[in-house]
Amino acid sequence: MIVDLRSDTVTRPSPEMLDQMMQAPVGDDVFSEDPTIIRLEEKIATLFGMEAGLFCPSGTMANQIAIRAHTGRLNEIICHELSHIYNYENGGYAFNAGVSIRLVRGERGKMSCEEIESLIQPDHDWLPKTTLLSVENTCNKGGGSVLTIEEMRSISECGRKHGLKTHLDGARIFNALITLNEQPSSIHEMFDSISICFSKGLGAPVGSAIVGSRSFIANCRKHRKVMGGGMRQAGILAAACIYALDNNVERLKLDHSAAQRLAEVISAQDYAENVLPVDTNILIFDLKKFTANEFLQKIDHEGIKAVAFGPKTIRLVTHLDFTDEMLNYVIEKLKNLSRQ
Ligand SMILES: *Cc1c(COP(=O)(O)O)cnc(C)c1O
């Protein structure tokens, strides 16, 4: 058996999803003529209580477009030190937008207003102007940790009080909303833009979106084009995203309980320590007996794949294609490793 727990991006489209893709009406989206993309953009914007949406090829591009559209040269952004835009987008904030960055520290993606305020630059000729506050929920590197509605609201109010624009990297916002038992519309007033991935827990093969005001999204369309993200008959992809929104949101609960179960088992093994609390579908823990590479090799022999998140740190991510049978198999193998 092969069990891939490297990421929730490894899922494959189901026959039902493929069927919906095959039937999608399409057109040239650079001319705004793809009816399925238009439907997806309207659907995701309405869900989040925003005026407009933009379909993008990846979550990274969605974040990069949003950063560029919100900022300019001589600007600086504030985000958490664990955030994806800082760690995993090739320094795109500097490369694409030409801005610098200042980092909030805090447990598992939490951001205090006090610290945000301490990072906002005073007005001097030799200091960049702080213009954007970017928040991540769930926080990937925080172990899929969730910021509550109240936490998001207080971060956003803090930024706005100082005239900052607010962006939410919501690649896994549906995982957070399921854990919080909240609707997407509950957060719309807090952020000027939100990026959302359909190809993570929701199981679409490709696709992300940005939502925001009509004028902001119009500006984002230009940035998407110059980054090479203007696609043509991509309605076949948008159809998969619509299918994912209609069918794969509620079931994220199952991924969360599977991750909980894995965390219980891992916590009881003599080779593991510092198992981060599991809020959603991500499980991060440290190793005692082995290095991360040794551990990955051992589980690879059993057909199980994970990723290293540090020299002694492992990340496992549950998803749509991770069956109960696979869960039981992985649990048995993880227990066996203690006996070696
Ligand atoms: C995965 C992810 C993204 C986007 O990644 P892509 O692989 O480019 O789709 C952005 N932010 C967070 C927090 C993520 O986990």
Image (spheres, helix red, strand yellow):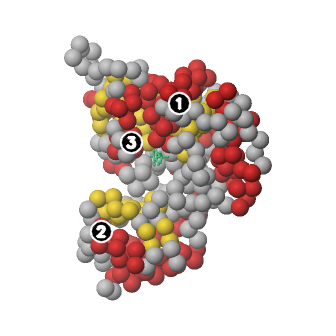
Kind of residue at badge 1: Arg
The residues bearing labels 2 and 1 have C-alpha atoms spaced at a distance of 38 Å
Q: Considering only order in the chain, which callout, 3 or 2, is on the residue closer to the N terminus?
A: 3
Circle 3 Cα neighbour tier, 10 Å, few/some/many (<14 / 14–19 / ≥20)? some
Marks 2 and 1: CB-CB under 8 Å?
no
Residue 189, position as x, y percentages in the image: 56, 30
> What secondary structure is found at the residue carrying circle 2?
helix
Q: Considering only order in the chain, which callout, 3 or 1, is on the residue closer to the N terminus?
A: 3
Decide if residue 159 is on the left or right side of residue 214. left
Residue 158, position as x, y percentages in the image: 40, 29
Q: Residue at x 74, y 51 (%)?
A: 22
> The C terminus appears in which quarter of the rendering?
bottom left
Q: Residue at x 62, y 43 (%)?
A: 183
Query: Which residue carries the number 3 mark?
Result: 89
Q: Front-most of 309 and 132?
A: 309
> What secondary structure is found at the residue carrying circle 3?
loop
Query: Which residue carries the number 2 mark?
Result: 293
Q: Is residue 200 visible?
A: yes
User: Hey, which residue is sitting farthest top in the picture?
Assistant: 125
Foreground disc of the pair 2, 1 = 1
How many numbered marks does the figure carry?
A: 3
Q: Residue at x 70, y 56 (%)?
A: 18
Query: Which residue carries the number 1 mark?
Result: 224
Residue 3, position as x, y percentages in the image: 50, 71
Q: Which picture quadrant has residue 209?
A: top right
Kind of residue at badge 3: Glu
User: Hey, which residue is sitting farthest left in the picture?
Assistant: 126
Mark 3 Cβ inside 8 Å of ligand 1:
yes
Q: Which picture quadrant has residue 112?
A: top left
Kind of residue at badge 2: Asn
